[in-house]
Amino acid sequence: MKKYIFGAFLVISLLIGLTINNKPMVSDSTSAAKVPEQMVIIREDVNESLETATFAGGCFWCTEAILQETPGVIHAISGYAGGEEFNPTYEDVYTESTGHREAVRVYYDSTVVSYPQLLDIYWRSTDPVDAGGQFVDRGFSYTTAVFYENDSQKAAAEEYKVNLDKSGKFKTAIVTQILPFSTFYEAEEYHQDFYIKSTDRYKEYANNSGRNEFRQRIWENIMKEEATR
């Protein structure tokens, strides 16, 4: 009888041990929501040998359109970057509670277009002194940021920001943040290539949002001044 009792005790102990060892290493729901550094989830089949860059420039429809049409850019993917909520939806990010910004992740051929050139194209599509959003879109998720992925990108982004600040082209300080890349989650399919899929809606938004007017009034004048020097 004793050996049966001992055998039963051993089985129960093993089961308890397995249950304890297989518990997730999470103490509460808050820590469960956090994700590892440099988490990227995309559905597209991309060439991993390409260089990558990630920019937040307000509404990702417009940022994606501008970057996607750049020679050397193979993919420009709209998504959500920089926050801690795992794989959020548009509705989640819209609540301004996830820490994510609308952003675009670019896969590019560096033999055709360089990172500094992408920086220039990105910055000239934004209002870099607006700390509350971009144009008609207000809130943290629409604020601007460059997410650097290595020291070279960090140095190039910081240099561009410093030079833009010193240039005096804007009356107030440049507020676009330069941040380490951490997370990027691809947005819903209907957001991808919106300027192609819904051309009329895209044009109406781009014109009425104030972005196109700002680019023409500010950046195109800046480019004309630079060309005459």
Image (cartoon, rainbow, N blue to C red):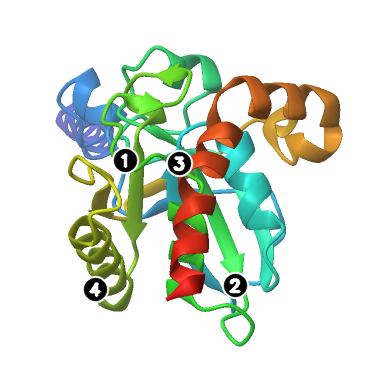
Instruction: Inspect the image, locate mark 2, and give the three-letter code of the amino acid beneath it.
Output: Glu
Q: Secondary structure at mark 1?
A: loop
Q: Which residue is mark 1?
A: 35
Mark 3 lies on residue: 57
Look at label 4 and name its amino acid.
Ala
Q: Which mark is first along the chain, 1 or 3?
A: 1
Write down the residue under mark 4. 155
- Label 2 or label 4, whichever comes before in sequence order: 2
At label 1, counting other C-alpha atoms closer than 10 Å, the crowd grade (few under 14, some 14-19, many 20 or more) is some
- The mark nearer the N terminus, 4 or 3, is 3
Q: Please name the residue that numbered disc 2 is placed on.
A: 48
| In the image, residue 142 above or below residue 185 | above
**N-terminal-most mark, 3 or 2:** 2
* Disc 2 residue crowd, few under 14, some 14–19, many 20+, Cα 10 Å: few
Q: Name the kind of residue labelled 1 in the image.
A: Val
In this view, the mark in front (1 or 2)? 2
